[in-house]
Amino acid sequence: MLALRLARGTHPLILLRRLLVSAASAGVGFLLLCTLGYAVGHPGASGLRLAWCAVPLAAAAYFAVAVARTDPSTRPRSGLCAVGLGPARLASLAAVSTAVSCTLGSAVALLVYLHLRGDISGLPFDGDAAGLLAADQPMPLAAALTLLAALPVTASVATGLALRPRTLRPGETGDPAHPEEPAPTPASGLPWGFALIAAGLALETYVSRGGQGHVFPMPGHPESSPAGVLGGWALTAVGLALAGPGLAHFSGRLLQLARPGAARLLAGRILMTEARRIGRPLGVVCAVASGAIAAATLYGDRAGPHPFGPLTGLGAALVMGSTVATLLTAALESRHARAGTTKVLLSLGTPAALLRAAASLRAVALLAVFTPLTVAIAELAALPLR
């Protein structure tokens, strides 16, 4: 009840982000229900399709956690602590709010699914997808509810774990309720990230030498890809996500080379400070982009003008939309975090044009570092199957 009262008094922009979480949950729920409908008609070929749905589910949960982090109601305040709402209680409220948003989306997905199957009539487009959704077979209600509960449970648990209060180690600074703010050395993740990238590329090359091997069917696509190659790409994607903060930190150092001016110095310092907050979601976006480039390269010339089916398109849209929205949410959080610093700089007479130039330089530096790496990883990931 308290979570609902807080939602009623929330800023419209925050409510919009929660509605986007509900929309992502609805898409994931509909995709899971479509997989369930396919499993009813094809019992032996549903496990891998369900495993494929884990990717958009993880992306939607990641977006839900990012939205919960930026919610002002999850920030500890002295007034709330006085009435018993400390960091742990606020983390629980954030988890409940996330569960409510995701459950709303899952309910919408169930209604749309039943409507397109023809189980609910009296509305436009009722029964239009009866063949695709196996309307001639009874839908197992228990399995459907279990699948629809997967995202609300996953997102709420992840939110509670991400926002739980932590005890900082000696020498670290930051807000213990928001563990992403302490950033001892963002560059320390680079060795692990590049090691995973190298291991993934080596695995892809190794498994491609033995032919096609075991296959991993893509939903809505008549062909398939070697499971080992996709597993290798997954390792490269995780490695790129781990290396994201270090690469963002490197971008800040790159801006400050060769006697920087005020704009480059300010932009580089901001990038180095916010490397952990911005770098990880940016690395995830680049991992998704590399996967999209590799998939387009692999399947673009194999199945004519329509290489992907509708369910594959829905899953790809969910993954891309959720990761990009997470990156934009992190950028907005960074802007709010440095609002006090910006105000002080303006009060000291810093021109607004200088701040805009610094923001442009940060964007250019990140693009210059991440774009070539993303394209290179995508080409190397697709190379063994060409």
Image (cartoon, grey):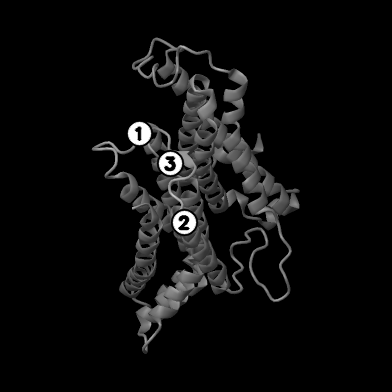
Tag 2 secondary structure: helix
Q: Which residue is mark 3?
A: 318
| Residue at 50%, 44% in the rendered image | 55
Work out how far the residue at label 3 is from the one at label 1, CA to CA, in angstroms: 14 Å
The image shows residue 293 at horizontal and vertical percentages of 34, 53
Q: Which residue is mark 2?
A: 204
Is label 2 in contact with label 1 (beta carbons under 8 Å)?
Answer: no
Sequence-first disc among 2 and 1: 2
Sequence-first disc among 3 and 1: 1
Furthest-bottom residue in this view: 259
Task: Look at label 3 and name its amino acid.
Answer: Leu
Work out how far the residue at label 2 is from the one at label 1, CA to CA, in angstroms: 25 Å
- Circle on res. 309: 1
Query: In the image, is 252 to the left or to the right of 304?
Result: right
Q: Is residue 326 visible?
A: no
Q: Quadrant of residue 384?
A: bottom left
Sequence-first disc among 2 and 3: 2
| Residue at 40%, 47% in the rendered image | 320
Furthest-left residue in this view: 305
The image shows residue 281 at horizontal and vertical percentages of 48, 57
Nearer to us: label 2 or label 1? 2
Seen from the viewer's position, the closer of residues 88 and 215 is: 215
Task: Look at label 1 and name its amino acid.
Answer: Gly
Would you place residue 145 above or below residue 24 in this image? above
Tag 1 secondary structure: loop
